[in-house]
C-alpha cells in the first residue's frame, strides 16, 4: 500500500481551486453506490477523489521544439527526454489509482498489459495523452539499471531512487547502500566526504535494483466522461515509462 508522500508538495499555479488530501488510500474496492446513478453530482465525485485518491506529480508532455522537418528530434538537444518528449509545469494533483487487472473490459481489448493502471483525476485537472504522472510513494523498479561506472562522483539512474534492493558488479562484488553508495535523486553516488566503503573501478559494469518514484505515461487518449453535459473527469490509462520505451 502506498504511504504518504515524502516529496515536498508543489504549489498549484495552473488552477487555484486545486487542493490535495493527506488521505492516500488506493481505490481498489470500487466506487460508492451513487457513482452509477444518473445524473452524477460532479461535486460529490470530486470530493470522493479528494478523500480517497492519491496525490501524484503531473507534468505536461509534448514534442520538443527541436524536432526537424523529418519529424526526428535533435540528438544533441538536452531539453527533451527519450523519444523527443519535453515535459513542463509540474504540479501536484489528486486522482484514484486502479490496477488494470481489475478492469476486465479493458484487458479484453488487448491494448493493455498487466501492470498498466487507470488514473481518474478530479474534473478540474486536465491530463492528456503524452503527459507524465509520477507516483509519490516508492515502488520496486523491477528490472533495475545496468550501468557502467564513470569517472565522476556519481552515475545516472533511470528513476529517482529511494532505497537500494541489491547492487552487484560484473565480478560479483556486492555493494551496500549508505556504506559504498548513496541514492540522491536520479544519481547513485560513489564518492562523498568521510566515506569508508568501496566502489567499482571506472569502466566496470554493475547493476542496481532499487525502489523508486516510478514515472508513468498517458499512452492513449484519455476517455472523457460526462454526466448531464458536465465534465466529471477523464479516465487516464497509464504505463510505466521504461516499458513504453521498450515497445
Image (tube, helix red, strand yellow):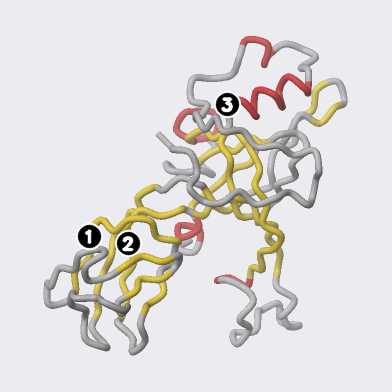
Which numbered mark, 2 or 3, is in the foreground of this view? 3
Residue corresponding to mark 3: 52
- Compared with 223, 63 (above or below) is below
Q: Residues within 10 Å of mark 3 (few under 14, many from 20)?
A: many
Q: Residues within 10 Å of mark 1 (few under 14, many from 20)?
A: some
Question: What whole-number distance in Å separates the C-alpha atoms at marks 1 and 3?
Answer: 34 Å
Residue occupying the far right of the picture: 229
Q: Residue at x 25, y 56 (%)?
A: 165
Q: Quadrant of the N terminus?
A: top left
Q: Position of residue 107 (x, y in %)?
A: 49, 35
Residue corresponding to mark 2: 144
**For residue 134, side relative to residue 139 (left or right):** right
Which circle's residue, 1 or 2, is located before the other in the chain?
A: 2
Callout 2 secondary element = strand
In terms of image quadrants, where is residue 199?
A: bottom left
- Compared with 146, 25 (above or below) is above
Q: Position of residue 56 (x, y in %)?
A: 58, 45
Q: Residue at x 85, y 27 (%)?
A: 230
Which numbered disc covers residue 166? 1
- Compared with 222, 195 (above or below) is below
Question: What whole-number distance in Å separates the C-alpha atoms at marks 2 and 3?
Answer: 31 Å
Amino acid at each position: 500500500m502506498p504511504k504518504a508522500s515524502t516529496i515536498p508538495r508543489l504549489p498549484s499555479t495552473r488552477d487555484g481551486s486545486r487542493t490535495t488530501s493527506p488521505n492516500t488510500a488506493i481505490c481498489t474496492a470500487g466506487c460508492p453506490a451513487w457513482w452509477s446513478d444518473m445524473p452524477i453530482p460532479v461535486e460529490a465525485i470530486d470530493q470522493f477523489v479528494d478523500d480517497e485518491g492519491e496525490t501524484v506529480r503531473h507534468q505536461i508532455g509534448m514534442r520538443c521544439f527541436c524536432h526537424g522537418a523529418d519529424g526526428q528530434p535533435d540528438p544533441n538537444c538536452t531539453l527533451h527526454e527519450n523519444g523527443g518528449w519535453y515535459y513542463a509545469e509540474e504540479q501536484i494533483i489528486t486522482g484514484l489509482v486502479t490496477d488494470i487487472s481489475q478492469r476486465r473490459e479493458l484487458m479484453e481489448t488487448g491494448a493493455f498489459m498487466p501492470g498498466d493502471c487507470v488514473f481518474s483525476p478530479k474534473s478540474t485537472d486536465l491530463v492528456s495523452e503524452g503527459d507524465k504522472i509520477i507516483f509519490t510513494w516508492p515502488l520496486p523498479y523491477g528490472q533495475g539499471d545496468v550501468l557502467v561506472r564513470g569517472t565522476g562522483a556519481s552515475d545516472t539512474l533511470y528513476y529517482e531512487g529511494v532505497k537500494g534492493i541489491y547492487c552487484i558488479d560484473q565480478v560479483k562484488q556486492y555493494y551496500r547502500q549508505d556504506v559504498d553508495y548513496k541514492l540522491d535523486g536520479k544519481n547513485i553516488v560513489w564518492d562523498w566526504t568521510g566515506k569508508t566503503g568501496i566502489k567499482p573501478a571506472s569502466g566496470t559494469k554493475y547493476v542496481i535494483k532499487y525502489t523508486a518514484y516510478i514515472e508513468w505515461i498517458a499512452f492513449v487518449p484519455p476517455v472523457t466522461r460526462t454526466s448531464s453535459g458536465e465534465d466529471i473527469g477523464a479516465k487516464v490509462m497509464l504505463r510505466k515509462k521504461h516499458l513504453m520505451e521498450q515497445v
